[in-house]
Amino acid sequence: MTFLHQVLQWFADPSHWQGTGGIPHRLAEHLLMSGASVGTAALIALPLGIALGHRRRGGFYAINVSNVGRAIPSFALLVIALQVFGIGARPAFVALVALAIPPIVTNSYAGLMGVEADIREAARGMGMRERAVLFRVEIPIAMPLIMAGLRTSAVQVVATATLAALVAWGGLGRYIVDGLAQRDFVQVFCGAVLVALLSILVELGLGGIQALAIPRGLRLTSAPERPVGYPDSGLAA
Amino acid sequence: MAAGMLADATDPWIRWDWVGRHIPVITAALLQHVELTAIAVGAGLLISVPFALWAWRVPLVRDPVFAVSGILYTIPSLALFAMLVPFTGLSTLTSEIGLVSYTLLILIRNIVVGLEGVPAEVREAANGMGYRPLARMIRIDFPLALPAVIAGIRIATVTTIGLVTVTAVIGQGGLGQLILEGLINDFKSPLLVGAVLSVLLAVIADISLSGLQRLATPWSQAEARA
């Protein structure tokens, strides 16, 4: 029997589609953990990045936090979190939140810094209060980069949630980790295909949402590429 | 179980006697880490340069090249290594194919962005001075693109150093082996040594490459001083 045949058979097996070890359950675990991590990270990182960008200072920290983040291997971060918090969902959650914060801070900071001084002056000249300048002028103009940060972060978290299987948590990574442990390379391959498909879908799906979130007035001009020197996604996952 | 919990409670973050007895193991892991990273970034550059030049010269090729390298970049590292295992086994080759794949998007994008950043006037002036295309590329386009190219190499190197740790799962890993050992034996010393050395390695690589960047582009400091 060829390898491809075994792979198809694995996917066709009804027992792989039900119960706590089934694909729907693992997928739900994966998405729930990723969503909770990115959501929590956004609650911390968005106010921070936006405040730094609005006050136009602290850039050194905003940029360097992401460089340091890149240097810490997510695998090491997960295992350290496991030692601190014990086995289960908690170490995975803490490590993923820590990984998700830097791209959001850096991009929202860069987005607000990119708003031209003339535009802010014009808004103030029109009699806008500081809050209105922030919420009605700066944040909408910075939206493409803010969304880019969230997207980068989300794709990275979905990718790293795979590694969470190594610290005894669920998600689609379980198929890869269990398969490697059992030398069941069919299961390894099928798990890898599922994870790869999910990552690509999330990347493309968030790309669509990102396009929708850009204010209409800005869509006329061409949307900026994500900043050079900060590759999109899945960093060091 | 009780003994395990007791051992866990008394296991300090670092036991220097363990480190002292395992210097050869740690050194070997560090060297393997450097080797896996160097091969990945080197091979990544060899593959990226022609594709980047192609994408730069032929606009039609640009989008497909970025799309393919982007998809490779999006696939989580563990999944990419896992997909290769049935074909190339638990081998260095599997690790390197995966690691090289991740450098491609970063390197190709930065090379193309660097080349596109060369001002049209400069290129025109070079043409006007009678540079032939190849000479112009080597003596004008390439040096001016160099800062972006080296920035790409820096990001690719730091990213690869992090990813190498994951290859411990498929039997390679360099310092990742120490991290995995810490995980399997529930023992903090190898974990901490592996994690700290891998961060240090990334920081040292980043600083060295930024020094190289300054040496390779002396004009950028002249501009900064002016």
Image (spheres, coloured by chain):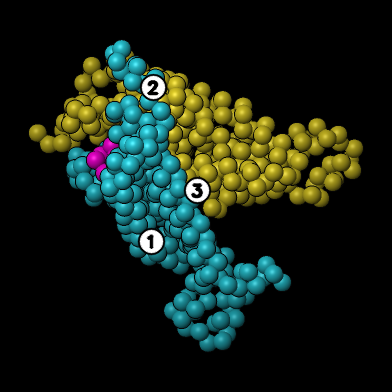
Chain colours: A yellow, B cyan
Q: Please tell me in which quadrant of the rendered image residue A166 appears.
A: top left
Quadrant of the rendered image containing residue B165: top left
Which mark is on residue B45?
Answer: 1
The chain identifier of the residue carrying mark 2 reads: B
Q: Earlier in the sequence, mark 2 or mark 1?
A: 2
Residue at point 50%, 65% (across, down): B212
User: Is B171 one of the magenta-colored residues?
Assistant: yes
Do marks 2 and 3 share a subunit?
A: no
Distance of label 3 from label 1 (alpha carbons): 16 Å
Res A168 visible? yes
Q: Which amino acid, mark 2?
A: Thr
Residue B194 screen position, x and y as percent: 37, 40
Return the residue at label 2: B10
Which numbered mark, 2 or 3, is in the foreground of this view?
Answer: 2
Residue placed furthest toward the left: A1
Which residues are the magenta region? B166-172
What secondary structure is marked by label 3?
loop
Relative horizontal placement of residue A225, taking residue B159 as reference (left or right): right
Spatial distance from mark 2 to mark 1, Cα to Cα?
47 Å
Task: Tell me if residue A229 comes above or below residue B131 in the rendering.
Answer: above
> Label 1 marks which chain's residue?
B
